[in-house]
Image: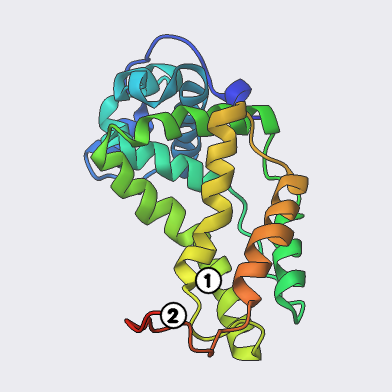
């Protein structure tokens, strides 16, 4: 069941006994409350987008107090990005022995959530990134950089095997597929599937990554002031 349907709806309840004891330091934070709050944040993100989402609305959806939320997250950006991060399954970085094999194994891994719900989530947050500096910072540090670490490892191994020349800009290669996926999302309103990723790998990433380094003299021929007879 997706967070959109599992989050509890209804008016905010009075701070329950668990929250009261948390507030006074009587016991550790209840992890089950974390799950309910994350699910409420994701449901609202999919429904109304990041800009309209508020801590008050998350508290109301989860039947919790704002104090409970602020004891766990410093603000809206931290809560939403943490919820997105927890939704994404942690999968091992493939090691097939080739760059192509590793990239294909990564893009053909089974999705972690319903495609339509995932599309609504990403549209809800991507459209706000250009306007919210705090969201950009948290999204980059907590979501993008950890998720790109596997790709960085795949390309680093390819360099070590000699598949990719050492002069390649790995950061650009790593960012290529995510950037095109976001562009596809904003253009067509859907998260691209494995077929799209396969085309990017075949037509862009592998040719750019494995092209031989040119050692020839590429300077323009010198010109002469001597006129032709």
Q: What residue is drawn where x is 39% and y is 53%?
A: 142
Q: Is 125 displayed left or right of 39 in the figure? A: left
Observer-side mark, 2 or 1, equals 2
Instruction: Determine the residue located farthest toward the left in the rendered image.
Output: 24
Residue 21 in percent (x, y) is at 29, 37
Marks counted in the figure total 2
Q: Residues within 10 Å of mark 1 (few under 14, many from 20)?
A: some
Q: Depth check: 100 or 53 in front?
A: 100
Instruction: Determine the residue located farthest toward the top in the rendered image.
Output: 11
Q: Is residue 140 visible?
A: yes
Q: Is residue 27 visible?
A: no
Q: In the picture, residue 157 is in which quadrant?
A: bottom right
Residue 223 in percent (x, y) is at 37, 81
For mark 1, what is the residue?
A: 152
The secondary structure type at the circle numbered 2 is loop
Q: Depth check: 153 or 38 in front?
A: 153
Q: In the picture, residue 210 is in which quadrant?
A: bottom right
Instruction: Choose the circle earlier in sequence order: 2 or 1.
Output: 1
Asked if residue 26 is positioned above or below residue 54 in the image, the reply reads below
Residue 16 in percent (x, y) is at 36, 25
Q: What residue is drawn where x is 61% and y is 24%?
A: 6
The N terminus - image quarter:
top right
Instruction: Determine the residue located farthest toward the front in the rendered image.
Output: 229
Asked if residue 165 is positioned above or below residue 131 in the image, the reply reads below
Q: Is 122 displayed left or right of 154 in the figure? A: left
Residue 139 in percent (x, y) is at 38, 47
The C terminus - image quarter:
bottom left
For mark 2, what is the residue?
A: 228
Scheme of colours in the image = rainbow
Q: Depth check: 122 or 33 in front?
A: 122
Q: What residue is drawn where x is 41% and y is 42%?
A: 81
């Amino acid at each position: 069941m997706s967070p959109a349907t599992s989050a509890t709806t209804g008016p905010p309840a009075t701070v329950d006994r668990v929250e009261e004891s948390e507030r006074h330091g009587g016991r550790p934070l209840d992890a089950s409350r974390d799950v309910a709050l994350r699910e409420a944040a994701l449901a609202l993100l999919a429904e109304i987008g990041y800009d309209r989402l508020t801590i008050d609305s998350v508290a109301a959806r989860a039947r919790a107090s704002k104090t409970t939320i602020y004891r766990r997250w410093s603000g809206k950006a931290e809560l939403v990005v943490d919820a997105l991060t927890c939704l994404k399954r942690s999968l091992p970085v493939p090691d097939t022995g080739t760059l192509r094999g590793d990239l294909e194994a990564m893009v053909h891994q089974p999705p972690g959530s319903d495609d339509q719900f995932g599309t609504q989530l990403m549209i809800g947050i991507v459209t706000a990134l250009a306007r919210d500096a705090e969201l950009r910072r948290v999204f980059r540090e907590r979501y993008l950089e950890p998720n790109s670490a596997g790709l960085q490892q795949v390309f680093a191994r390819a360099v070590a095997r000699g598949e990719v020349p050492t002069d390649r800009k790995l950061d650009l290669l790593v960012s290529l597929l995510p950037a095109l996926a976001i562009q596809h999302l904003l253009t067509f309103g859907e998260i691209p599937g494995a077929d799209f990723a396969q085309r990017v790998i075949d037509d862009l990433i592998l040719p750019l990554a494995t092209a031989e380094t040119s050692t020839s003299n590429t300077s323009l021929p010198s010109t002469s002031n001597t006129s032709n007879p």
